[in-house]
Image: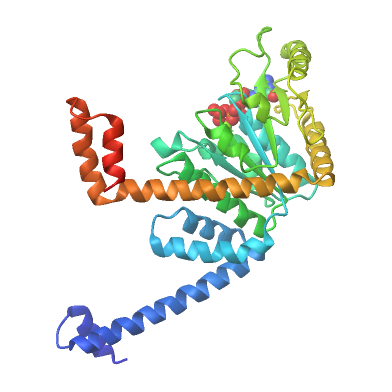
Amino acid sequence: MAKEKKSALKEGKGVSVSEITNLSRIKTIKEKRKSKINTEALVASILNKNITALSRAITLVESKNLTHLEQANTIIKACLPHANKSIRIGITGVPGVGKSTFIETLGKHLTSKGKRIAILAIDPSSTLTKGSILGDKTRMEDLVKDANAYIRPSASGDSLGGVARKTRETIILCEAAGFDVIIIETVGVGQSETTVHSMVDFFLLLKLAGAGDELQGIKRGIIEMADAIAINKADGDNLKRAKLAKVEFNRALHLYPEKSFNWHPKVTICSALKNEGIDAIWELILEYVAITSKNNYFYEKRNEQNKFWLIQTIEEQLKSDFFNTPKIKKELENQLQLIETNQTTPFAAADYLLKI
Ligand SMILES: Nc1nc2c(ncn2[C@@H]2O[C@H](COP(=O)(O)OP(=O)(O)OP(=O)(O)O)[C@@H](O)[C@H]2O)c(=O)[nH]1
Ligand SMILES: [Mg+2]
């Protein structure tokens, strides 16, 4: 292609319409070819355990740009056959319970055994503030430097569902990049535990020893989700209280029916700061994986999770398509005003909007 034509095209002069069309067609083909090569190269690098490539792919997954999302889909599809081989662990607990410290200690324990670990986060507050729980990478300063550990701050987005989807896709990419253990951290806010629970194999709840009121202030439902409860900060003056809390939790847990897959949630104590009891928790996780792999529950659960995520993704997409339709946006405003002035009911308004 002549150079002069190209610059003429840029300036928009002296070129016929058909020449412009031809030029842009060639440009599109070239771009497509380029992006295809990039995508393939990126997948090859990810499979080669290249962290820069992994980070680039995750950025594509998190992007709002449609071309990026198309590329992300291609990459995920190519990575899928290489995924699924890790142990996925969810960790939750109130702010300050010691999640970051725990993950750092467990992470170092695992990398010292030659394992490669990836740490992701779901942070519902970040969907609003664009912040991130793993923004405090300083708390994991040793792990950050560890070549066998990969820490990715949580994605931000408009909804928990959207962020969760990105995290699920990131899990696939990390697995393709050969990580043996994936840890997903979340703060116990809103629906975030349920969301994390629906994407991990093992769900660990971190607790602090209180003064005999262990079961108060704990959200019902979390106990049912937890495969283990670890009472952290079991050190110094706190050790005795932590031991008492363990007895109390164990007693309370026995009131819950045994889970169908031969696993009764375990209670342990640990000190993330002093690295005490962390290896025992890892052994517990391995025991869980062994039992549930043997009775097939491990794989059934992943299948159930995949089906759940199919429905979840459709719901999320339909919702976002609906609310982003310009006509709906406008009519929704009108209907909201009519509700304020008592001229319609929420149900009549919903019916009207859904039929547009
Ligand atoms: N004594 C003691 N202190 C601990 C232990 N684990 C964590 N801490 C301390 O507790 C504080 C909070 O720890 P983090 O690891 O930041 O807690 P977090 O749950 O990640 O907190 P958020 O990120 O705010 O949700 C820090 O000052 C830690 O040093 C422990 O096992 N024993
Ligand atoms: Mg933290």
Residue at point 78%, 37% (across, down): 285
Q: Is residue 233 left or right of residue 292?
A: left
Which quadrant of the figure has residue 99? top right
Vertical placement of residue 204 versus 353, above or below: above
Residue at point 68%, 15% (across, down): 209
Decide if residue 155 is in sight here: no
Decide if residue 97 is in sight here: yes
Vertical placement of residue 253 versus 24, above or below: above
Q: How far across and how far down the image is residue 205, in percent? A: 66, 28
Which quadrant of the figure has residue 266? top right
Determine the residue located farthest toward the left in the rendered image. Answer: 13
Residue at point 84%, 40% (across, down): 291
Seen from the viewer's position, the closer of residues 290 and 35 is 290
Ligand 1 is found in which quarter of the picture? top right
Considering the image in quadrants, where does the N terminus appear?
bottom left
Q: How far across and how far down the image is residue 260, in percent? A: 77, 33
Q: How far across and how far down the image is residue 334, in percent? A: 18, 38
Seen from the viewer's position, the closer of residues 135 and 219 is 219
Which quadrant of the figure has residue 9? bottom left
